[in-house]
Amino acid sequence: MTLAHPEWLWALLALPLLWWLSRPPRPRRHLWTAHLAQWQAALSALRRRPPRGAPLRFLLLALALVAAALAAGGATLPGAPGPRRLLVLFDGSASMAARDADGRSAFERARARLRERLAAVPPHVAVTLLRLGGPMLRRYDAAARAGMDLGAPDGALVVDPGLLARELAAGGADADGDAPVLWTLTDGQGQRALPTVGALDTFPTVGANAALLDVRLDDRWPLPALRLTVEAVAFAPGAAPIELQALVEGAVVATAPQRRAAPSGQRETFVFELQRAPEGGALRVAVSLPDLAPDGDLLPADDAREVLLPPLPAPRIAVLGDQDAGPFVEVAAEALAEEVGGSVVPVDTGDEVGLLLVDGGVVAVPPGRARALTFGTDLDGRREPEPWQAPAGIDWAREHPLTRGLDLSELRVERAFHDLLPAGEAFLWADGPDGPTPLAVVVDGPQPSVHFAFRLRDANLPLLAAFPQLLRRAFVQSHGAAALPVWAGAPPPPGEQDLTAPATAPDRPLPPFGREDRELGGWLVLAGLCALALRAWVR
């Protein structure tokens, strides 16, 4: 027995006082009489006895005092030695979604085992759970015991459980001298070796799996043609080649699937030349093992991806040019219409246009709110732009979507205009009196617009080989997010597809945990009260 507050034992010094108080009182005086026999007979008739000590009553009182002192002193019984902390390493990587013959995934079986085993762990043991694979999650005590909010199998096993377990074991005990018990739950996939320390539960699933590793989309929007490059792999037990099939379906003209026989684990590339549907929609890319039953692929989560293709626009190009514009804007409109498969239409037709092409003049085009490409155009009519003769030091943004991969080194501008451009992201500039000064900007908004500080007749831009591609990119840029495909999900993480030979090791059970110290305060108080109650019945 141990005491948290041994100073309360000083209360036991009251025992001599209680013994003295429990003694019978002495007679105050002595009387001599010749009638002792008659007095004793009368006392017997009254069933009274002469005063004398009651050792049992004193013993019960003393027992109550001792019990009260020990309860106040925090008496406890030490528990059995053993670990009092548990650290669980739970594998939540993508391969844990593989299903067994009963249709249960390794993740579901591991979570059920976790709840079952933790229900038998004493409540005083502090439990911490780390979910490895994908986003790392931490759960403590009640949340860890219930396996709450562990998500779904996702991501790669970036942190190797075996290495982490060895590092934690090498760290030893904490400041209180309490070393945690390690418990690993994993399928053994994506690991060189399983943890050699602590408890271990494995849930291996061995079988065939086809995986879609990567999908690259060469989108030629607003043209209907697009190219899809699919990289896939198939894993199967045995050394015989396995048939791998790639299929594209959805918002494209129907195309035949492609099949290829390859050794297990060999990366294969499939190329699809497709024609998209004008209305757009969901495009699904999937791989499979056609020679196996539908449930033969143990990990169907990595078999397919979807992309939402935007609808094709109305590729009509409207042109505005002042009387001094010359033929350049018309030539630019024709070049753009040819590049996007559209046509040039008058401005006043009332039809929706894909892009408004303006050269010079004053046009009320709100930047970022109308799909427009302007060259030396005053957008509000309230400015008096200052001519900028022969800007020097022309340079461009090499990584901007409009100019990436284009060569503008031969661009020459005879005249531009200061203070003509709206506020936006510059991608073309020249040396000005105060440093680099924009010559062209992109204004973001509901309908992004592109603006140049010079007119087409004042530069050799229409003569450059990069000009048609720049026009096409400006057309795409003006449609903003409406021109971009939207991918659903993410490619499967590497190292999670091969289910043919996961790392295995014999399972190791959890060790016995230490028993918690038992506080005796309540029992001691109850014993003291019982002693006092019994003393009331003792005469």
Image (cartoon, grey):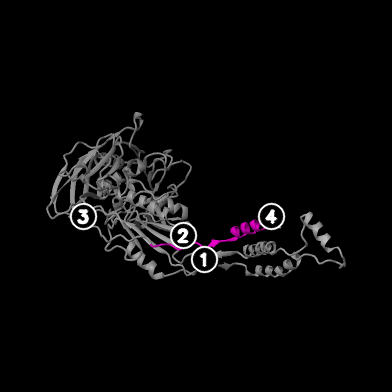
Q: Nearer the viewer, mark 3 or mark 2?
A: 2
Secondary structure mostly seen in magenta is: helix
- Region of the chain picked out in magenta, as a range: 511-535
Helix, strand or loop at label 4? It is loop
Which of the marked residues, 4 or 2, is nearer the chain's N terminus? 2
Residue labelled with disc 1: 78
Query: In the drawing, what numbered circle is on residue 537?
Result: 4
Q: Nearer the viewer, mark 4 or mark 2?
A: 4
Q: Nearer the viewer, mark 3 or mark 4?
A: 4
Pointers 3 and 4 in contact (C-beta within 8 Å): no
Q: Is residue 206 magenta?
A: no
Which of the marked residues, 4 or 1, is nearer the chain's N terminus? 1
Q: Residue at x 59, y 67 (%)?
A: 4
Pointers 2 and 1 in contact (C-beta within 8 Å): no
Distance between the alpha carbons at the discs numbered 4 and 2 = 45 Å
Which image quadrant: the N terminus?
Answer: bottom right
